[in-house]
Image (tube, rainbow, N blue to C red):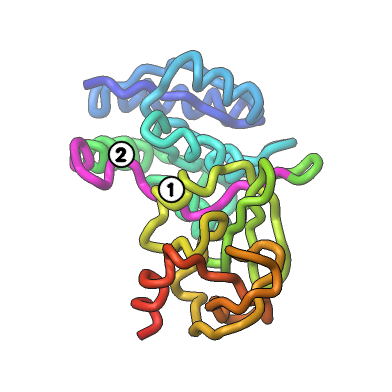
């Protein structure tokens, strides 16, 4: 079956070279070039319009770079095309796989290496059909701050708390605001986070223990009441445990 390809690179000659290589390997790896873009904004719209199977994606581009674009695509879940990074630099390889890239090609790309990448995507996608691995879990949370997009590793998060229409994401060093719903995060990352309260998810690995303490304004019941609270690694803050979730949390710290 022919694979539908979309190329994203800010350099015209780089896009042209990839197009030629795709044509050269078409007999070995049937493919159809369905679109090209020179920046992330154009790529996002083009990918929606053409629905490719694979995006050949440069990393260093003006504005939103390739890693940010891949993170954005990852939010689409099952609709996400496979991402194969094509970069002049090897330094980004580890970051690339953090955003679920299926391969990483270093420029100048050779026809044989590109064919290998397309075959790898076809094999991996064929194995994942109908299995629980079809939609990989995210490795990062995407945070919008002013004119930039940040990627916060899931492994850095200590807890998430729903407040008004946003969710506060807390790491060891600072807070971030994200627009994901707490319920969707819990459903997707239930092996990473546990609900300790109706408005709070805590990283399982961050829980050091529990203690009795005075509940603040966000606690269940009246302010000033004593209740069980979670002791977190690396921060002094204590988080109240609701009566409904007490048995779940207690089982984790036994």
157 vs 134: above or below: below
| Residue 215, x across and y down, in percent | 65, 73
Is 93 placed above or below 164 here? below
Q: Secondary structure at mark 2?
A: helix
Residue 44 drawn at (x, y percent): 57, 25
Neighbourhood count class around disc 2 (C-alpha, 10 Å): few under 14, some 14–19, many 20 upward = many
Task: Tell me the magenta residue range.
Answer: 127-144
**Residue under numbered circle 1:** 100
**Where residue 102 appears, x then y in whole percent?**
38, 45
By secondary structure, the bulk of the magenta-drawn segment is best described as: loop
Residue found 54% across the figure and 23% down from its top:
16
Could you say whether the residue bearing mark 1 is in a helix, strand or loop? Answer: loop
Q: Quickly name the residue at label 2.
A: 121
Mark 2 and mark 1: Cα distance apart in space: 12 Å
Q: Quadrant of the N terminus?
A: top left
Residue drawn at x 48%, y 29% is 18
Residue toward you, 250 or 84:
250
**Pick the front one: 167 or 131:** 167
Label 2 or label 1, whichever lies nearer to me, is: 1
Q: Residue at x 52, y 55 (%)?
A: 198
Instruction: Indicate the position of residue 2 as horizontal and vertical percent values.
Output: 27, 20
Which of the labelled discs sits on residue 25, or is there none?
none
């Amino acid at each position: 079956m022919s694979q539908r390809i979309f190329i994203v690179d800010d350099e015209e000659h780089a896009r042209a070279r990839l197009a030629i290589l795709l044509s050269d390997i078409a007999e070995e790896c049937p493919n159809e070039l369905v679109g090209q873009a020179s920046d992330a904004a154009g790529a996002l719209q083009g990918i929606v319009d053409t629905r490719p199977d694979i995006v050949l994606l440069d990393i260093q581009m003006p504005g939103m770079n390739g890693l940010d674009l891949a993170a954005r695509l990852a939010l689409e879940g099952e609709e996400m095309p496979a991402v194969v990074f094509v970069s002049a630099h090897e330094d980004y390889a580890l970051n690339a796989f953090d955003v679920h890239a299926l391969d990483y090609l270093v420029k100048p790309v050779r026809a044989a290496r590109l064919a290998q990448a397309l075959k790898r995507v076809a094999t991996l996608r064929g194995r994942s059909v109908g299995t629980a691995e079809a939609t990989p879990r995210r490795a990062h949370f995407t945070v919008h701050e002013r004119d930039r997009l940040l990627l916060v590793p899931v492994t850095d998060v200590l807890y998430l708390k729903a407040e008004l229409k946003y969710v506060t994401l807390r790491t060891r060093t600072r807070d971030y605001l994200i627009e994901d719903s707490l319920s969707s995060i819990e459903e997707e990352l239930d092996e990473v986070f546990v609900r300790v309260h109706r408005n709070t998810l805590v990283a399982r690995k961050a829980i050091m223990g529990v203690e009795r303490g005075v509940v603040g304004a966000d606690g269940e019941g009246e302010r000033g009441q004593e209740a069980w609270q979670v002791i977190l690694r690396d921060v002094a803050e204590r988080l109240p445990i609701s009566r409904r979730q007490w048995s779940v949390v207690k089982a984790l710290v036994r």
